[in-house]
């Protein structure tokens, strides 16, 4: 899994029938300090994410293991919407890098 931020949508009116019904997003990789990297991926959305949200995404064969992407030709899938990211100690004394409830 990788940490990323949904930064845009990808619209395709002509596509393989196995992609019908999937929402496609442009996801930017995030560094540990929650800053955008120069790496992007187009990911199918299995969670109902939206632009601006921090997400976990899987790529490769793992991307085809969600209910929404099973047997579909995808190489990346959004599989979780992140609520918090904490390092060094978990919730008890760790440093909060991201908190969905306080970010804008």
Image: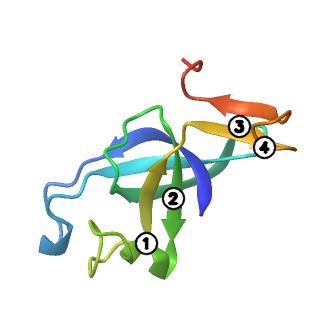
Q: Which residue is drawn at the image coordinates 54% and 17% (left, top)?
A: 104
Whole-Å distance between the Cαs marked 1 and 2?
8 Å
Badge 4 vs badge 1, beta-carbon distance below 8 Å: no
Whole-Å distance between the Cαs marked 4 and 1?
27 Å
Label 4 packing within 10 angstroms: few (<14), some (14-19), many (20+): few
Label 1 packing within 10 angstroms: few (<14), some (14-19), many (20+): many
* Residue at the limit of the structure toward the front, as seen here: 92
Placement of 47 over or under 91, stated as above or below: below
Q: Position of residue 10 (x, y in %)?
A: 32, 48
Upstream in sequence: badge 2 or badge 3: 3
Q: What's the colour scheme?
A: rainbow
Locate residue 20: give its quadrant.
bottom left
Upstream in sequence: badge 1 or badge 3: 3
> For residue 90, which numbered disc appears in the image?
4
Which residue matches tag 3? 34
Left or right: where does residue 46 sit relative to residue 4? left
Whole-Å distance between the Cαs marked 2 and 3?
15 Å
Which residue matches tag 1? 63
Whole-Å distance between the Cαs marked 1 and 3?
23 Å
Between marks 4 and 1 in the image, the one whose residue lies nearer the viewer: 4
Q: Which residue is drawn at the image coordinates 71% and 37% (left, top)?
A: 34
Upstream in sequence: badge 1 or badge 2: 2
Which residue matches tag 2? 57
Upstream in sequence: badge 4 or badge 2: 2
Badge 1 vs badge 2, beta-carbon distance below 8 Å: yes
Upstream in sequence: badge 4 or badge 1: 1
Whole-Å distance between the Cαs marked 4 and 2?
21 Å
């Amino acid at each position: 899994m990788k940490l990323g931020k949904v930064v845009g949508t990808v619209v395709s009116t002509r596509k393989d029938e196995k992609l019908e019904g999937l929402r496609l997003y442009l996801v930017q990789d995030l560094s540990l300090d929650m800053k955008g990297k120069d790496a992007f991926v187009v990911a199918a959305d299995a969670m109902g994410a939206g632009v601006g949200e921090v997400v976990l995404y899987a790529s490769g064969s793992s991307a085809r293991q969600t209910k929404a992407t099973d047997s579909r030709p995808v190489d990346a899938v959004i599989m979780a919407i992140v609520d918090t990211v904490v390092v060094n100690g978990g919730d008890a004394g760790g440093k909060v890098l991201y908190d969905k409830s306080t970010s804008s």
